[in-house]
Image: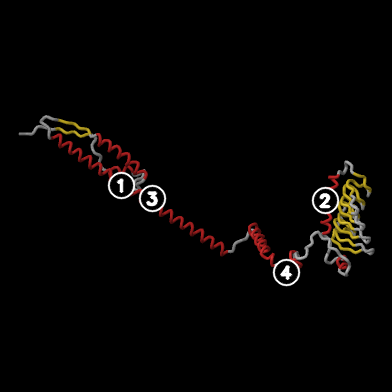
Amino acid sequence: MDTTEVYISWESTVYPDGGMYEGLMKDGQCHGKGVFQYADGDRFEGEYKEGLMDGLGVYRWSNGSIFKGQWKENNMHGCGQKFYPAGAMEEGEWIDDDFVGDYAACSPEEALATAKEAEIISDQAKMFMNKPDGEVTAKLEDGKAFVNQNPVVYAAGTEYLAPGPIGNAFAVPQTMVEKLLATAKLHKSIYDAWNFQIPSQAELEEEEKTKEKKRSDLASKAAAEYARKQKEAQAQFDAIVDEEDDEEEEDEDDDDDDEQDSGKGGANVASISMSMRAMQFTLERAARRVTTSMKWSPRFTQKSCASQESRQPRNPPLACLSLALPAQK
């Protein structure tokens, strides 16, 4: 088993013939994504494998022709599109640099899709350009012609948008200050919403005090409400008891009147009178007394009902018997 480690590095190299390469390399050969500017003016942006163009990429000839598609061992091989300076275009399949046309292996739709994928790879390869400490950068700084081919270029007046110290070297236009502040505020709100912040000890103590005060206020309100309801229940109970006492007194007065009336009759007159009204009131009072004592009165409980019976007002008789006898001479 081969355990040799393979290192891929980002290199920026100038060759003796004037060609320049910027991109990934392995063992001194182009490997991965990169950009090769040939000495004759041709240029390739795409994928390499062990020093050869292999994969997807865009090749630009010095005469203006452009091929976007698949490569294998430095040859156009597979689907793609080729554009000529006069405006002609070929799309379909290539085999070893030879165009074989539009066959079932590569339809025009597939050729277009492959060309778009090659453009994406080209943009990714150009990200490796302008290595700060590379040989290509040093050579271009000597006054050689240079066209920025990076996929992201800040146009004149927008250099302040560039990240890092480059953007800080340019002033922000006054017309953009308010918009940039609003954007920064939005970004900060998103950051604060999605990043947990541990509160300080003082904040935790203040939060606990607030919660304790709320709990105390709720307990005080509950106690006051309970006392109010107890007072109302006692008042209702007392009113019911007073009403029943008044009714009993009226019934007793009525019975006394009936008894006196029966005594005024002739001799040998005996009468028995039944007070149905008294019986009705007695039953109603008994029902109300049981219900009220169980529901409202704080003085009555289930265990003490029996002991309270002796305290209730005495019920009037269900029947009154009166006997009139002749007077003794």
**Under tag 1, what secondary structure?**
helix
Q: What distance separates the C-alpha of mark 4 from that of mark 1?
A: 87 Å
**Under tag 3, what secondary structure?**
helix
Q: What distance separates the C-alpha of mark 4 from that of mark 3?
A: 73 Å
Q: Position of residue 125 (x, y in %)?
A: 84, 57
**Under tag 2, what secondary structure?**
helix
Task: Assess disc 3: are there few (<14), some (14-19) or many (≥20) residues with their C-alpha within 10 Å of its C-alpha.
Answer: few
- Type of residue at label 1? Ala
Label whose residue precedes the other's in the sequence (2 or 4): 2
Residue lying farthest to the front in this orientation = 86
Is the residue under label 1 in contact with that under label 2 (CB below 8 Å)? Answer: no
Label whose residue precedes the other's in the sequence (4 or 1): 4
Q: Which numbered mark, 4 or 1, is in the foreground of this view?
A: 4
Q: What distance separates the C-alpha of mark 2 from that of mark 4?
A: 37 Å
Residue corresponding to mark 2: 116
Q: Is residue 59 above or below residue 137?
A: above
- Type of residue at label 4? Ala
Q: Is residue 312 above or below residue 84?
A: above
Q: What distance separates the C-alpha of mark 2 from that of mark 3?
A: 81 Å
Q: Is residue 307 left or right of residue 126?
A: left
Label whose residue precedes the other's in the sequence (3 or 1): 3
Is the residue under label 1 in contact with that under label 3 (CB below 8 Å)? Answer: no
Residue corresponding to mark 1: 239
- Type of residue at label 2? Lys
Is the residue under label 4 in contact with that under label 2 (CB below 8 Å)? Answer: no
Residue corresponding to mark 3: 229
Is the residue under label 3 in contact with that under label 2 (CB below 8 Å)? Answer: no
Q: Which numbered mark, 2 or 1, is in the foreground of this view?
A: 2
Q: Position of residue 184 (x, y in %)?
A: 67, 62
